Amino acid sequence: VSYDPEPEIQRYLERLSSATYDLPDARRRELLSEIEQHIRQALAQTPCTSRDDMLALLEQVGDPAEIAAAADDRVDAGRERRAGVIAFLRARRLRNVSIALSALAVVGLAIGSVAWIQSYQPLAYLDVPSVHGRVAVTFHRGYRFSVGVTVRNNGRFTVRVLDVPYSSGAFSGLPVSARVLMSRTIGGPQPVTRPRCHVPYLPGCVGYTAWPSGPYEPFRPFDLKPGRMRMLILVGVYGNCADQRNLVPISVADLPIRYRFLWKSATARVPLPKEREIAPPSRGCLSPIALSRHLIATGPAGVSRVFRAASIEPGARIFCAGHAAHASALVPKRGGSVLGSAYGPDGRATIHLTTRRNGSVVAVCMTDDQIGTGA
Amino acid sequence: MVAVQASLISQMRRGVLQYCVLALLAEEEGYGFDLVKALGEVEGMVTSEGTIYPLLSRLRRDGLVETTWQESPSGPPRRYYSLTASGREALSTFAEEWSRFRDGVDHFIEGRRP
C-alpha cells in the first residue's frame, strides 16, 4: 500500500494557517502558497514512503510557529510578537476599519432615513391673498359654515392624503358635524380671488378666495404629487343647538390633515395664514342632516336644482341663501308649488318649489340681485 | 551554555541571512526552493526552510529583490527572485562593512590566541 502524504500536508498547512492568523491576508495567502509549493517540490525530489518520512520532511520545513514568527515584522524589529484579538484586528486594520465604517455608514443612513421619513411633512397651506381681507367665518343661524385650505405638497415626494380629522383639532369637544369636500382637480388651475362673493359660507367661497374649477366632491384619500395642490373644505353645522353652553366662538388656526408617506402615517397641522373665527348661532339651529341635504348653493347667477323623488320628502324644508337674506319653503305634495321669500335690510331672497308628478322637486332660488335685474 | 550559544548563532544568522540571500541572487535569479536548498548546504545558516519565505517576502517589500513568474517544467509556475539595483547596492555596502567587521573580530580573536 503506497503512502498518501496529503493528509499530513493539509494538517501542516492548517497549523501554519492558524499560526499566521495575525498576518495581513495577502501576506498570509502568499506564505501558505509558497510553503505548500516548497513541500510539494521537496516531495517531488524525495518521495516519502511513510508517515515518518513525511513528518521528517515537515520538520525540516520548520515549526509553523517559527515560520509565523519569522513572517512577523515586529519580531524582526526585536519586539514581542502580538497575539490575540488585538493582533488579529491590527493585521486587518484597513479592512476592518473600512468594514466598520461601511457598517456605520449603513446604520447611520438607515437611522437618518427613518428619522427623516418620520419628520417628513411636506404639506403646506397655499397662501392666497383675499381682496376683502376678512378672516371671520360667521356661523349664521341655521346654515352651514365652511372653512378650507388649499393644500400644497412642497416636498420632493408624493404623499397620500388620508383624511381631515377635524374633530381632533379646533372643533374638538364642540357639537360640530361636518363633511369634508375636495376640489375635483389636483393642481391645474390655481385658486383665484373672486372680486365679489355673496355667500361666504358656501363651498367655493372660503375667505372670499375661490377655487375656479367649480364643483367639489366628497373627500376620499388621494395622492398629492410634489408641487401639486388641492383644496379641502370643511362644511359643517352645529349638531346640537339645544346645548347653548357649547355655542362658543371657535378659533381655527390650522386644519389637521392626516397623510401617509411610505410606512409613516401622521397628522400635519397645516396652519392657516390668518386665524379664523367661526361664530356660533345666536338663536338655535336646524338639523345638520336637513341642512346638509336641502340647502341650495347659490351664487351671483342664481341656482336651480332638481331633487330626485327618493331624495326628499314632502314637508322637508329647502333653503335659499343670499347674502342679504335667507328664504326657505316646505316641499309641497306632488303636483303642488310653493313660493317662499325673506327680506333683509339690504335685499331679499326668494325660493320657488315645485313637486312634479313623479315626486322629484324643482327648486329655484333667486337672490335680490337677480330679482333686481329681472333675471 | 548551549542555549546561549544557540541564541548567539540565531542573532548572527538573523543579521546576515538576508545578505546571503542577496549574494545568492547576485549571480543569477533563483526561485524559493533552490535558494532554500543552497542556503541549507551551509551548516547553521538555515534552521527551518520555511523561514526563508518570509525573508524573501520582506526583501521584496523593501525593494531589494523583484519577482517574476515563470513556467515550471513540472508543477505550477514558480516565482523567481532577482536583485534590484537597490539590492545590489545594499549587498555591496554590506560586503564592505562585513569585511571590515570580520577583520576586526579576527584581529581580537587571533591576537588572544596562545
Image (cartoon, helix red, strand yellow):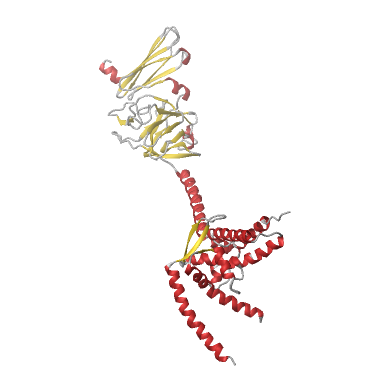
Rendered position, A104 above or below A324 = below
Q: Which residue sits at x=31%, y=24%?
A: A345
The reply to whether residue A68 is in sight is no
The residue nearer to you, when weighing A341 against B110, is B110
Q: Which residue sits at x=68%, y=65%?
A: A56
Residue A346 x, y percent position in the rendering: 29, 24
The residue nearer to you, when weighing A337 against A244, is A337
- Left or right of residue A37: residue A295: left
Q: Quadrant of the C terminus of chain A?
A: top left
Q: Please identify the quarter of the rendering in which residue A223 is found.
A: top left
Q: Which residue sits at x=46%, y=14%?
A: A315
The residue nearer to you, when weighing A303 against B46, is B46
Rendered position, A123 above or below B41 = above
Rendered position, A238 above or below A4 = above
The residue nearer to you, when weighing A104 against A21, is A21
- Left or right of residue A51: residue A96: left
Residue A112 x, y percent position in the rendering: 47, 48
Rendered position, A328 above or below B45 = above
